[in-house]
Image (cartoon, grey):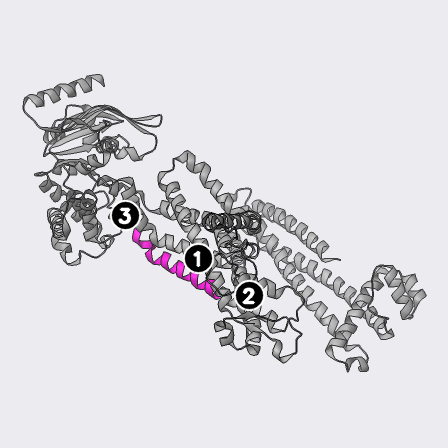
Amino acid sequence: MSTPLILLILAIIAIACYVVGTRHALAIAGGRSSKLHSRPGYYGTFVALCAVLPSVLILAAWLVVSPLYINSTVLDGFPEDVKARSPAEQGLSFGMVSSLARGMNVLSLDEIERIGGNPVELRAALGAKGVPLAGDPEPYMVESAGDLNVMTKISNWVMTAVVLLAALIGAGFSYTRIAPRFRARNRVEKVILASLVVASSIAILTTVGIVASMLTEATHFFTSIPPWEFFFGTVWDPRFAAAGATDSAGQFGLIPLLLGTLYIGFVAMLVAVPSGLFSAIYMSEYASRGVRSVAKPLLEVLAGIPTIVYGFFALTTVGPFLRDLSSQLNGLVTGDYANFIQAQSVLTAGFVMGIMLIPYVSSLSDDIITAVPGTLRDGSLGLGATQSETIKKVVLPAALPGIVGALLMTASRAIGETMIVVLAAGVAARMQLNPFEPMTTVTVKIVSQLTGDLEFTSPQTLVAFALGITLFAITLCLNIYALYIVRKYREQYE
Amino acid sequence: MNMMSEAAVEKALDKKMNDVAYKMIGKDVSVYYGDKRALYDVNLNVRQNTVTALIGPSGCGKSTFLRTMNRMNDTIEGCRVTGKITLDGDDIYDKEIDVVELRARVGMVFQKPNPFPKSIYENIAYGPRIHGLARGKTEMDAIVEASLQRAGLWAEVKDRLHEGGTGLSGGQQQRLCIARAIAVSPEVILMDEPCSALDPIATAKVEELIHELRANYTIVIVTHSMQQAARVSQRTAMFHLGHLVEENDTDKMFTNPDDQRTQDYIMGRFG
């Protein structure tokens, strides 16, 4: 039976168990659920869980282990001369075998009989059925493929039997345990608790995995390029030359990229912080309920726009506008209509990224300002302070730590942004301070190093991981620091 | 109810004859929160250098009335006040009156101690600074010391003026808030259940303070505690369901009230 079909049957069993278990519990209690320790539904759930959980675990384990076992058995069955070859070649042979096995399932018994052991005909027949083979199969492969098919089939039948048996045993066993004082709720809740723990550890474990994989690849990179050349190098020039040539590694200086990242992020924060903060102050302190209920969601819609769209906006509107503006300005002042702002520039990228960040700043700060207790405002107003004095001298100082935290989180978003930069500031890694010239960032270079026809083991590719881990470290530090500040000052207004 | 308010007006006229100085006079004060009416034509006069207690069951409008007296209700969306309240004869709801100036003259202390998250010194200096009451640091130091002295807090905090005001105990925080209100030299101090968040010892200290402050200030205090009203006030006003039931000398109020509802409330039959 196929796995989805088994799962479907298990689901049906689960539903049946739930219904039967619930009814049985009620029947034992004489129809009065107050006599039961737990609500009747918990007994049903308990029976269903006992039936399904072990069988699903067995199923999962079987699906992982049995192919491993079968494959190794098939590999063992290869002739001695094949086994003597390199693992890569054995892998290729095994690929052929499994293709053959799949193909032989497609062919009818008659066809297999007719073709017999003729490899060429077999390949043609399989090709006609839509199963392409890499080469002419050798006779031992056909034999192994047959073995493979047989073993897979047996394993599948045994698995189906074992899984369904486990489900029935579990159901039967738990059914007999139902009694008025049986603590079904506690057991069900334990299972639910466990599933909650699993769910929350997925994200954490994934993070650990990501860091580990980046670290491994970054270490590979640092074995070919010394760390100081990476961290303190001022030239970014990873030459895309043929691998293997000794002098072709190029230069991997992080500094120009880091500078670009920080510069563009800085310009973005210059745009986002004032307008975001002012809008937060307006929203939380001055806006009437009506205005707030319309304006706040509108502002938050901005946060939902994909950054690539901001990129278009920068590329087609803001960039050309700034370029034309600069040439007009230049013309007015000097009479020479040469533009001093490039269409792709730090300014364009920073400006558009700043607009992207406004809703983050304003929404986070708005929440923080609103969280400042109203009694503080009353206290200040009651002393005869004006509303603006109250905001400047009481509300904002009280909210400041939270706002700083929000700004740091926003900054780490700015640092991680890619699409806007690609479209608005270009991909040229340059070390300069003119905001009207193009620059690029770490994230953009990660993308460009990982895309393209490069050998994966070359430093040109591996540098992406070193860049990634650096970026990760920077944003992690920013976020931790932000959390630290927010936590440290939180108790002040509680 | 009309009978009631007419009687109150008559009584007020009587007092005027006897040369009583009224600091604030409320005439036909009604308050609406949106469509809901919270106060019905309240006529209540507040005497100079007197502690007036406002009592009544929860939701009776006593805090609402208190907040109309320095226009703190302005900060509540949809709140509307009709009638007339005067401070030394000037209508405080007049368009000419600056609400900021009014609140400097009529200070307020709130239910929950709400010191600003600043140092003790800065908490006191906040009001004088925004109103420009002090020239230079020496004068400011003097104001801070005098205010803390009056609030009976000086001895406890003089060595840690520059530590956070939120680090004080609840009772100290409330006295800090009173000191903060005193620092802008108001004429009237409104207190909205100032002891409801304090323990008995801290309450006793604040009550003692209220007693002393009476010499220099006119005080209106909202309280849920009959005993407190009896202890600290000279005049008591009883509110019920948005109406002013009775206003009288505290002694008379607690021994021989004119209104049956006052008697019932004081005896603990409702509320």
Q: Crowdedness of circle 1 by 10 Å Cα count: few (<14), some, many (20+)?
A: some
**Left or right: B186 with respect to A121?**
left
Which residue matches tag 1? A266
Q: Position of residue A254 (x, y in %)?
A: 51, 69
A154 in the magenta segment: no
Q: Which residues are magenta?
A: A473-494
Q: Position of residue B152 (x, y in %)?
A: 12, 49
At x 62%, y 80%, the residue is A246
Of B270 and A33, nearer the camera is B270
In contact (CB < 8 Å): disc 1 and disc 3:
no
Circle nearer the N terminus (1, 3): 1
Q: Position of residue A170 (x, y in %)?
A: 63, 58
- Quarter of the picture holding the C terminus of chain B: top left
Q: Position of residue A110 (x, y in %)?
A: 92, 62
**For residue A393, which numbered disc appears in the image?**
3
Of marks 1 and 2, the one in the foreground:
1
Q: Crowdedness of circle 3 by 10 Å Cα count: few (<14), some, many (20+)?
A: some
Of marks 2 and 3, the one in the foreground:
3
- Residue A494 seen anywhere in this rendered image of the structure: no
- Total numbered circles: 3
Of A45 and B58, nearer the camera is B58
Both labels 1 and 3 in a single chain: yes
A482 in the magenta segment: yes
Both labels 2 and 3 in a single chain: yes
Tell me which chain the residue with mark 3 is part of: A
Identity of the amino acid at label 1?
Phe
